[in-house]
Image (tube, coloured by chain):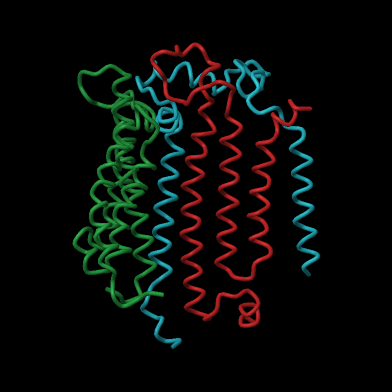
Amino acid sequence: MVDFITGHYAYWFTLSLLCVGLYGIIFKRNLVKKVIGLAIFQASVVLFFVSIASKWDATVTVIDKNIPVEQVESYLNPLPHTLMLTAIVVGVATLGVAFTLLIAIYNRYGTLDEQELLEKIQ
Amino acid sequence: MKLFKLLILVLFAAVLLYASLDLPYRGGSDNLMNAERSITDTPVIGNYAIQEAYNDAHTPNMVTVILGDYRSIDTFGEQIVIYTAGLITLLVLRRKRRRKTK
Amino acid sequence: MRSKHHSPIVLLGARLLSPYIMVFGWYVIFHGHYSPGGGFQGGALLAASILLIRVSGGRIISRMQLQEYLNTPLAIIGVFIYFLTGITAMLAGGYFLDYGQLPIPGMEPYWLRYTGILIIEVGIGLTVMAILVMIYDNMVKGEDYG
């Protein structure tokens, strides 16, 4: 039972952060707060991928002079770290485009509230 | 309306929690991700990258070797993504025809 | 929330910090081989050093550091460095972006790959810096301040 909790608690922390982001996207009425919820969602996905690349008693993915390379159990798996570098940069580009579209909507309609926007469009 | 949104959130969290009970233990030494060879007897990328990165490029940082040498076309595509995002902000926010609506 | 007078204390602190952040950004790009770092992280630090002056100083002071029309040429130069390395490797008889065939005389294959990774890291850093500053500049184009 203790083994089960020790092996799985990282997934539950990531799941709670994901639910906080999803709460922000669904329940808030202002458009800027929805974009902030999207940013929290992306951060939780990056955290999940980095946490599954770990091993017990292993060091970081830079080769040390005292630890030989053939001892594979003492170096972390480098592939999820590489993929998450790409994911972080794509997240930054998505946020830039989202805020640009929000500025264009404000210049055209004069409001950033969800209910007033739906009434003004029709 | 609020009850409907709450139901969607609770359903999403319950499905993910049920799926996370079946994942392997984090950091175990016999995971399929850290194995030497895969099920169909092909080399797995994690072990191959740790053992062969220094022989290929004489660089102590393994993440830079993977991102710049083994997967360099992905990094090139990502540079195009950043450049396109910058161009979008240039083209959406122009000021030539804005004064007509005022 | 934007007042008409800029605070001189914030501007003094930003002017003291900004050159050191830029030097640290170039250090992170060039030491991507020996410690965690590389192209994207160094490019974000360089953009942070320029945005510090733009946020706290206004338009007239920030034009002394980096002009606004220089952003797009810097981004295009960064993409071209990456692309020309790939085309040079293909013309010398290998695949696209195969650094083992670059025409530099007197090096073994693993030193050629070391040099190829270093060249593309510089290109990535320039592009990321120019685009992050350009996103901020286009968002505040309509307002008048400073």
The residue depicted at 48 percent of the width and 73 percent of the height is: A104
Residue in the foreground of this view, choosing between C11 and A86: C11
Residue A1: image quadrant is: top right
Chain green in the figure, letter: C
Query: Which residue occupies 57% across, 18% down?
Result: B43
Compare residues B25 and C128 and report the one nearer the observer: B25
Q: Name the one closer to the observer, C121 or C53.
A: C53
Seen in the image, is C16 located left or right of residue A76? left
Residue farthest front in this picture:
C9
As drawn, is B67 to the left or to the right of C66?
right
Residue C131 place in picture, x, y as percent: 36, 54
Q: Where is residue A102 in the image (x, y as percent from the top left)?
A: 51, 69
Quadrant (top left, top right, bottom left, bottom right) of the C terminus of chain C: bottom left
* Shade representing chain B: cyan
| Residue drawn where x is 51% and y is 12% of the image | A71
Q: Position of residue C71 (x, y in %)?
A: 29, 57
Asked if residue A92 is positioned above or below residue C87 in the image, the reply reads below
Question: Is residue A36 or residue B63 the one in the foreground?
Answer: A36
Where on the picture, by quarter, is residue B29? top right
- Quadrant in the picture for the N terminus of chain C: bottom left
Q: Chain A is drawn in which colour?
A: red
